[in-house]
Amino acid sequence: MIVFPNAKINIGLRITGNRSDGYHDIETIFYPVRLTDALEFVVSDQSIPKDILQVTGIDTGSEPDDNLVIKTLLKLRGNFSFPFLKIHLHKVIPVGAGLGGGSSDAACMLKIINKHFGLNIDNFSLKVLALEVGSDCPFFVDNVPSLASGRGEIFTSVKPVLSGNYLVIVNPGVGINTGEAYKNCRTEVPLTSLRQLIERPVIEWKGLIVNDFEDFAFTKHPIIHNIKEELYKSNAIFSLMSGSGSSVYGIFSEKPKLTEKLKENVIWEGVM
């Protein structure tokens, strides 16, 4: 069985408070995009008493047993019985890019195992399991544009506000450590909720919808700031870094003529 876990971008990201559990309260819009990995599994030979994961494509920088796909299977096996699997994950979504690739892989693994082996796990329980893997994993269970709050696990669906626009995602090839990014950002409750701001036309978002991680990311890796500036030079009507970085996206009213500096780092583009 094969599925294609998709990436997401963040429309705005505000860090609104510190939590007693060590996490942070945030407010963001998770928005699915069609940049995908490929995830396939077959039932393993009975003589191999474990799940085996092969990863190809972009280097994840970690061993297969440390991959969220394997960690997800281990959590499932704590409560459900199903055969051991041979899994092939082909990575296209960059790691440490603010696009949720690892979380999407994990959530897709949950959903396809539940469906294929008839585990009858309801949607709410799938999200509970996904949250144990990662804060943004539950988003990929429903995989629809959503306002996320709390530590990023409380979702309210929103309108597909990017429909009809042209999206360009650029990745500079540098990674941002999420923990380090949080440590270097201050918390502040915004005066206006993202739910209200996205009701405005996209052309009005510049300066209103922000990502609190950008200042840290721009200082650590100036290339990220340069990419955002180049997107605006290419007539983006809105541009923002996604998540804690390092990818930056630009929203255009039509397919743009990108500068040469951007073309070499574009990882996805298309009509939303």
Image (cartoon, helix red, strand yellow):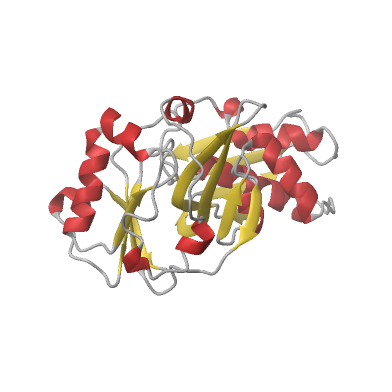
Residue 30 x %, y %? 52, 54
Q: Residue at x 82, y 32 (%)?
A: 78
Quadrant assignment, res 271: bottom left
Residue visible at 66% across and 49% down?
A: 154
Q: Is residue 107 left or right of residue 212?
A: right
The location of residue 168, given as percent across then percent down, is 32, 58
User: Taking 162 as reference, is 158 left or right?
Assistant: right
Q: Is residue 96 above or below residue 267?
A: above
Identity of the residue drawn at 85% across and 39% down: 81
Q: Is residue 98 above or below residue 155?
A: above
Front-lying residue, 216 or 75? 216
* Residue at the extreme left: 260
Q: 155 or 43, which lies in front?
A: 155
122 left or right of 31 in image: right
Q: Residue 9, relative to residue 201: is it above or below?
A: above
Kindly indicate the quadrant of the structure image that contains residue 172.
Answer: top left
Q: Is residue 149 left or right of residue 215?
A: right
